[in-house]
Image: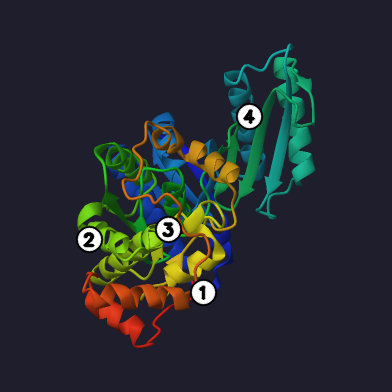
Amino acid sequence: MGLIMVRYGEIALKGGNRRYFIKRLRDNIRDCLRQNSLPGRVTYAHGRIYVDTPQVEAVLAPLSRVFGIVSLSPALMISGELAPAAQMAAIKEAALTLAREMGLDAAHSFRIGARRANKAFPWTSPQISREVGSFVQEATDGRVDLSTAADVTIDIEIRPEGAFVYGRTIPGPGGLPLGVGGRAVALISGGIDSPVAAWMMMKRGCAIIPVHFAQSEVETAKALDNIEILKQYAYGQEMRPIILSHAEVFGEIVRHLHEIGAASWICIFCKRMFLLRAAEIAAQHGAGAVITGESLGQVASQTLDNLEVISYGIPKPILRPLIGLDKVEITEIAARIGTFAISTRESAPCPYLPDRPLTKSTIAQLRAVLERLAECNAVQGGDRVCDLRSGRDDARTPV
């Protein structure tokens, strides 16, 4: 059996809720192993999670996508039940074995790092580094280099449950375990932004229900492929997308907006209808919010004035995790998580896009347009329109 040491971050700061967060992370790690048909046993001791598995290398990549994991390291473990002198001798041998496996010889440099979490161990961290370093140097003729430029780095952690020797640290996504942050509906298009927004909320522990409004086979295929990428991070949740027809939700409203000479409002009404439908789905599935990929000022519908109008009267909180990011930052995240290549495939333009979309709207103007639409009995979902016309404001502040 091999051993992987799993580290978490802000979970350690959760006080009385820490046990719940750790349990959820362990459960999600088990789900990761199960979904990838990988054997392993998940245990916990003194602030660390351990995965015992005969397939260490195969487990590393899936584990690196489990939210809540900050980093992980394949490690050699020396039992804490050994006498200190025997434990130190075993640490030296383990470090030497690892150094040779990593190719250390006279032509390469190395450094030894040590951290003594178990203060009962009689050697201090600097003493451990010096003793183990001398042992490895004598056996390999490797050059000592204490800087980060060393060819080989071997780390040692002395913990109550034992000593751990490792030469690799693989980063995880960090954040919180999926599921501890509730559930939200995520609007997913075929573009770059919305999958990134969903991923960022998943990183905060929020399980998502992906909803896509299909307007073309090309864009729907991209959205579904990106949802498949998100599923690779969704350990602890069974993610089931909901696909709705763009035309059925919005087509009639577009026609009537043209009839009353308000075509510049199409983008705003499109976003509002998406949010209203997503809020209904959220209520049906016990979700607490709607997630969008909007970024302030990126397109006409995402000016601050229009975001206020779009959000008006929506009966669920609207989460916009990308609101302060620019396109370069969003693109970098998309490339890192694996959605960028899909999102930038051949695109199909929106069939409803007006020639001159409105960039600055007000709630008073929205009310006036709603009045005109209601007069010709044009709007689907009449109850919502009446609520707005009568002045009852169920709007929530967008986040």
Q: Is residue 340 above or below residue 366?
A: above
Across and down, in percent, residue 109 comes to 74, 20
Q: Nearer the viewer, mark 3 or mark 2?
A: 2
Please report whichever mark, 4 or 2, sits nearer to the chain's N-terminal start.
Answer: 4
Q: Which residue is mark 3?
A: 292
Dot 1: what SS? helix
Dot 3: what SS? loop
**Disc 3 to disc 2, C-alpha distance:** 23 Å
Q: Nearer the viewer, mark 4 or mark 3?
A: 3
Q: Is residue 104 visible?
A: yes
Side of 55 relative to 320 (left or right): left
Q: Nearer the viewer, mark 2 or mark 1?
A: 2
Side of 258 relative to 146 (left or right): left
Q: Is residue 321 above or below residue 227?
A: below
User: Which quadrant of the view contains residue 138?
Assistant: top right
Q: Which residue is mark 2?
A: 252
Q: Which residue is mark 4?
A: 95
The residue at the point 37 percent across, 63 percent down is 262
Side of 397 relative to 271 (left or right): right
**Disc 2 to disc 1, C-alpha distance:** 52 Å
Amino acid, disc 3? Thr
State yes or no: discs 4 and 3 in contact (Cβ < 8 Å). Answer: no
Across and down, in percent, residue 236 comes to 33, 54
Q: Which residue is mark 1?
A: 16
Please report whichever mark, 1 or 3, sits nearer to the chain's N-terminal start.
Answer: 1
Dot 4: what SS? helix
